[in-house]
Image (tube, grey):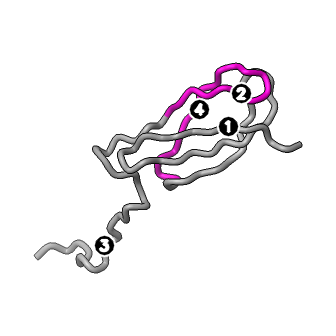
Amino acid sequence: MNSSAEPSDADPLDDEDLPLGDGTAESEVLVVCPHCGEANELGLDPGGGPLQEYVEDCQVCCRPWRVTVRYAEDGTAEVFTEPLDE
């Protein structure tokens, strides 16, 4: 007999834990700073949930902006940036 946890004790993943699809969710994206217009590469965290919102500083002008990430069922990410109200 296997000494591992019973199936009822296991913590199965919900559809909301990770994006569905082939298991490959986007983990990097190129966005444009809403202040200076320069390109910035962002690392994404698919494990953070299907909808995420946080503040990021521009890698060029250092001004803060709000990042909103929405993961689709296939693991693709829609990323929006907007100036942070200062």
Question: Who comes first in sequence, dot 2 or dot 1?
Answer: 2
Of residue 60 and residue 85, the one placed in the foreground of this image is 85
Question: Who comes first in sequence, dot 3 or dot 4?
Answer: 3
Give the class, few, some or many, for how many residues have Cα within 10 Å of label 1's Cα (few <14, many ≥20).
some
Question: Who comes first in sequence, dot 3 or dot 1?
Answer: 3
Which region of the structure is painted magenta? 28-48
3 vs 1, front mark: 1
> Real-space Cα distance between discs 2 and 3?
43 Å
Which kind of residue does numbered mark 4 sit on?
A: Leu
Question: Given the current orientation, which residue lies at the most extreme left position?
Answer: 1
Residue ID at (53%, 48%): 70
Which kind of residue does numbered mark 1 sit on?
A: Thr
| Residue holding disc 1 | 81
Question: Who comes first in sequence, dot 2 or dot 4?
Answer: 2
Q: Do the residues labelled 1 and 4 touch (CB within 8 Å)?
A: no
| Residue holding disc 4 | 42
Q: Are marks 2 and 1 in contact (CB under 8 Å)?
A: yes
User: How far from the left and from the top, in percent, is residue 66?
Assistant: 72, 42
